[in-house]
Image (cartoon, grey):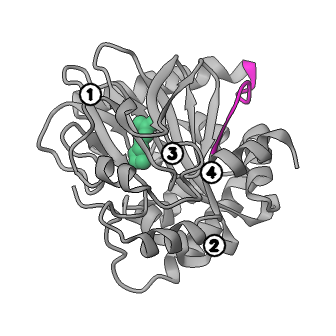
Amino acid sequence: MSSAKQQYEEQGFVIVPGLIPPGDVKELEDACDRVIKKTRTGEWPHRRTVGKQFPPFDNDNPDSWGVQHVMHPDLGEPAFAKWYTSDALVNTTAELLECSEEQLQMELFNLLINPESHDFALRWHRDDVKEDATEEEERKALGIWTHGVQWNTAMYKDSCLYVVPKSHKNSRTDEQRVHSMTQAPPKDPMDMPGAIQVTLQPGETVFYNSNILHCAAYDSKQRRATLHACVGDIRGGNTRARNVLQHGLKWMKEDKFREALGANQRGSAMLKSLIDMQEGVQGEVGYSQSN
Ligand SMILES: O=C(O)CCC(=O)C(=O)O
Ligand SMILES: [Fe+2]
């Protein structure tokens, strides 16, 4: 086992530097700038709205903490799919998931940004387990959560994320439950027993189990452009459907997206796996969290 895999397995997260090819950094930064501008001016409607921690996002506040669907063909930014399917990123992902490249499934790809004029924060949560889950429900959910990985790649220094190492394997202690049974963000994230703040330097990527206990705090004065995505492994079957499809991914099934991927064969194969999962889902998947 590599040391990255060992740390990911034991702690639930691992930071890997230098995955973006140096020649591609500027291209990604510029693409981020353009989609952030479109989001802040209202030209791009798919955004994470200040005041809403989890999907479905609404339009109630003009300020945004994220740009949704950065690979969407209507944004016209090929740099994002190029990075999502790049060799170093894909190889690291496959290594952490212990699967082959052919088993990888394309999922979400969003961009997390600083709100312009309101500080905002997310409560302590696990992405696909509700805060009032019983200990047994929590254990069961953690037990099946092995076929996907989430990553954040920081374009600029980023200290927004807090995690409780090892909590991807363990249900909450009574004290941790007290700190996470509320829908309100914490006054101080470090009050959570076992919490650590994750700091990423520009170009670093943190890979994490999205059901690790985590929260985040967004400072409107601290520039943030952090690529935020997840990738699945088809052996997970429908276990990942709700977590992924709740964000609204019908556009990924359309010809326009397939055409935009063009000669990116790896991307096209990963997309096919997502569509296969999507087609296997009957009815509505619902939402992982209530806002
Ligand atoms: O801002 C972050 O880094 C974490 C975001 C998050 O936890 C979420 O979207 O569920
Ligand atoms: Fe989360």
Q: Earlier in the sequence, mark 2 or mark 4?
A: 2
State if disc 2 and disc 1 touch (CB < 8 Å).
no
Q: Secondary structure at mark 3?
A: loop
Q: Earlier in the sequence, mark 2 or mark 3?
A: 3
Asked if disc 1 is less than 8 Å from ligand 1, the answer is no
Q: Which residue is mark 2?
A: 236
Q: Position of residue 161 (x, y in %)?
A: 45, 33
Q: Nearer the viewer, mark 2 or mark 4?
A: 2
Q: State yes or no: residue 16 in magenta.
A: yes
Magenta-colored span: 13-22
Q: Nearer the viewer, mark 1 or mark 2?
A: 2
Q: Earlier in the sequence, mark 4 or mark 3?
A: 3
From the viewer's perspective, is residue 43 above or below residue 251? above
Q: Which residue is mark 4?
A: 261
In the rendered structure, the answer to whether residue 95 lies left or right of residue 135 reads: right
Callout 3 amino acid? Met
Dot 1, how many residues are within 10 Å of its Cα: few (below 14), some (14-19), or many (20+)?
Answer: some
Q: Which residue is mark 1?
A: 40
- Report the residue at 80% width, 58% height from top: 101
Q: Quadrant of the C terminus?
A: bottom left
Q: Which residue is mark 3?
A: 71
Callout 1 amino acid? Arg
Q: Nearer the viewer, mark 4 or mark 1?
A: 1
